[in-house]
Image: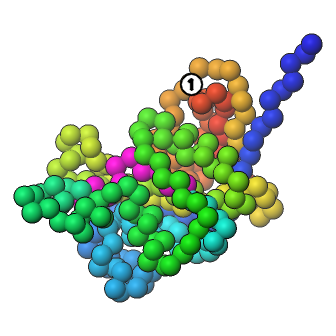
């Protein structure tokens, strides 16, 4: 009997914002640049990544029945560095800000925004695939795909921090009408290619650039309308 072709799975990108701050931007600089997007009382407590994620989510209009998939390899690096440097009197507030997924939580809590589910993912070489697979199987009608990093300090030399700050947020649905782009997955028995990094994916989103690679048992594509 002939084998049936495995169906392609697709999701469509609607709201999309990318944050690619200038190299060397500090958290203090980000607070000045993005001050109009946050309440003043929340602004002073937010990390650099929290500010970038909040800016990327600006205008996404999330609803209580929506879900969020949040991806970050290193998360709040500066808060972690400061927390480690606070010993032998460790700071509870720095610890709270340093944990994954603090960046997303700072935004959702600060805006008093309930959502149905939050899927926080950490990883490195195939983190993007993990995040995209989670988006595909999430049953919510709208899923916010969010990710990012903040530039580290002394932890960069130990390969435990990102050398660059960035963030993105995309609202992904099953509805093609009005979409800016789409993500597709077609099951295929082929050896895995190198998976794009979270930073490479962010750059592709910013430039509306296409991506194609094999991984996780199938062919991935990022395409634009």
Span of residues in magenta? 69-79
Look at the image and say whether residue 73 sits in the magenta stretch: yes
Residue furthest bottom in the image = 40
44 to 212, vertically: above or below: below
Give percent across and percent down for residue 162: 31, 48
Give percent across and percent down for residue 129: 55, 39
Residue for point 7% across, 58% down = 88
Is the residue marked by circle 1 packed among few (<14), some (14-19), or many (20+) residues within 10 Å? Answer: few
Q: Which residue is mark 1?
A: 192
- Which residue is nearer to you in this view: 219 or 108? 108
Q: State how the image is colored.
A: rainbow
Residue for point 43% across, 46% down = 122
Question: Is residue 153 something one can see in this rendering?
Answer: yes
Left or right for 191, reference 98: right
- Which residue is nearer to you in this view: 222 or 47? 47
Residue for point 34% across, 79% down = 43
Left or right for 196, reference 93: right
51 to 32, vertically: above or below: above
Quarter of the image where one finds residue 67? bottom right
Q: Quadrant of the N terminus?
A: top right
Residue furthest right in the image = 1
135 to 63, vertically: above or below: above
Q: Secondary structure at mark 1?
A: loop
Give percent across and percent down for residue 200: 47, 45
Question: Is residue 180 something one can see in this rendering?
Answer: no
Q: Quadrant of the C terminus?
A: bottom right
- Which residue is nearer to you in this view: 66 or 126? 66
């Amino acid at each position: 009997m002939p084998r049936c072709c495995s169906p392609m799975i697709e999701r469509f990108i609607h709201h999309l914002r990318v944050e690619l701050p200038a190299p060397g931007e500090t958290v203090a600089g980000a607070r000045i640049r993005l001050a109009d997007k946050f309440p003043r009382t929340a602004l002073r407590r937010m990390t650099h990544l929290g500010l970038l994620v909040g800016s990327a989510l600006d205008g996404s209009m999330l609803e209580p029945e929506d879900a969020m998939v949040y991806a970050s390899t290193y998360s709040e690096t500066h808060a972690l560095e400061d927390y480690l440097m606070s010993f032998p009197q460790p700071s509870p507030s720095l610890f709270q800000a340093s944990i994954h997924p603090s960046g997303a939580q700072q935004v959702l809590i600060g805006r008093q925004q309930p959502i149905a589910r939050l899927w926080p993912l950490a990883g490195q070489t195939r983190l993007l695939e993990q995040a995209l697979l989670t988006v595909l199987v999430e049953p919510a009608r709208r899923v916010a795909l969010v990710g990012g990093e903040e530039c580290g300090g002394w932890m960069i030399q130990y390969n435990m921090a990102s050398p660059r700050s960035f963030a993105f947020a995309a609202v992904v649905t099953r509805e093609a009408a009005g979409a800016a782009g789409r993500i597709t997955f077609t099951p295929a028995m082929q050896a895995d290619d190198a998976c794009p990094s979270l930073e490479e994916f962010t750059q592709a989103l910013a430039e509306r650039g296409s991506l194609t690679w094999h991984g996780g048992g199938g062919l991935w594509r990022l395409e634009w309308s």
